[in-house]
Amino acid sequence: MLAIAVAPEGRVKEYILNAWDEIDRNYRINFISSNSASAVPHITLLAGIDEIFGDNLIGIIKKIAIDSTPFGMHSNGLGMLLLDSPLIYLRWKENIALHSLRNRILNKLELNGIPCKNTAYNFEWMAKTTICFQDTNYDSNLLKTINTLKTTFEFSYKSTIKNLMVIKYSEGESEETVSVFRFDKQECLKHSLID
């Protein structure tokens, strides 16, 4: 299966990478850090796209990236979903640019006849970056993990989103980054500022 994601950069990325390292070292919680695409914290925009559409999908994502400009996002604290295994994630403030990007992708996929099998996820979507899941439990380590994450956490991180990623995933295997496309309008802006 394939997914489309964006990767936050800067201090928020550093925070998550350090948090992954610390909770792995202290509590052996490493499912997400070990299985995330190229160990890059990301926000999944869409998931559940069959690999048979891979070439077509990559072409669509590349065109969307060429026509996109970087945009800023702000974190909004930490959150937790009370699933069979607690899912702890970084929350993001509502962001018009992110929703617009996601909707453009959804519309292009629909126009090109590319279905997303995971429609429940796609309709109930929220912007989040998962920090830990699968190897978390409702035990004494859960509170310790939360406290560890809070220790170095700053409530509001700012990040610039500069690219779109296509990720390959399947149950029991680590995610793999298939393609990364930088937003090209940024390059045009850089060149016009230099000239």
Image (spheres, rainbow, N blue to C red):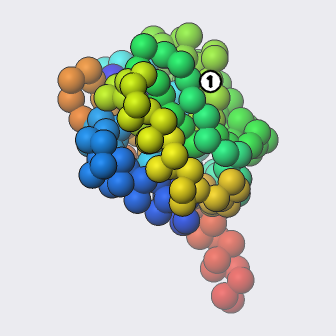
According to the picture, the residue beneath numbered tag 1 turns out to be 125
Q: Is residue 10 above or below residue 8?
A: below
Picture coordinates of residue 126, whole percent (x, y) = 64, 29
The image quarter containing residue 159 is: bottom right
Count of labels shown? 1
Image side of residue 7 versus residue 78, left or right: left
The answer to which of 130 and 115 lies nearer the viewer is 130
The image quarter containing residue 71 is: bottom right
Q: Residue at x 30, y 42 (%)?
A: 27
Q: Residue at x 53, y 19 (%)?
A: 82
Picture coordinates of residue 122, whole percent (x, y) = 58, 19
Within 10 Å of disc 1 (Cα), the crowding (few <14, some 14-19, many 20+) is few
Q: Amino acid at mark 1?
A: Trp
The answer to which of 68 and 87 lies nearer the viewer is 87
Image side of residue 72 versus residue 17, left or right: right
Helix, strand or loop at label 1? It is loop
Q: Residue at x 71, y 35 (%)?
A: 99
Q: Quadrant of the N terminus?
A: top left
The image quarter containing residue 31 is: top left
Q: Residue furthest left?
A: 173
Q: Residue furthest front?
A: 140
Q: Is there any visible trace of residue 166 in the rendered image?
A: yes
Picture coordinates of residue 81, whole percent (x, y) = 56, 23
Q: Residue at x 44, y 41 (%)?
A: 144
Q: Residue furthest bottom?
A: 195
The answer to which of 42 and 165 lies nearer the viewer is 42
Q: Is there any visible trace of residue 106 in the rendered image?
A: no
Picture coordinates of residue 88, whole percent (x, y) = 51, 34
Q: Quadrant of the C terminus?
A: bottom right
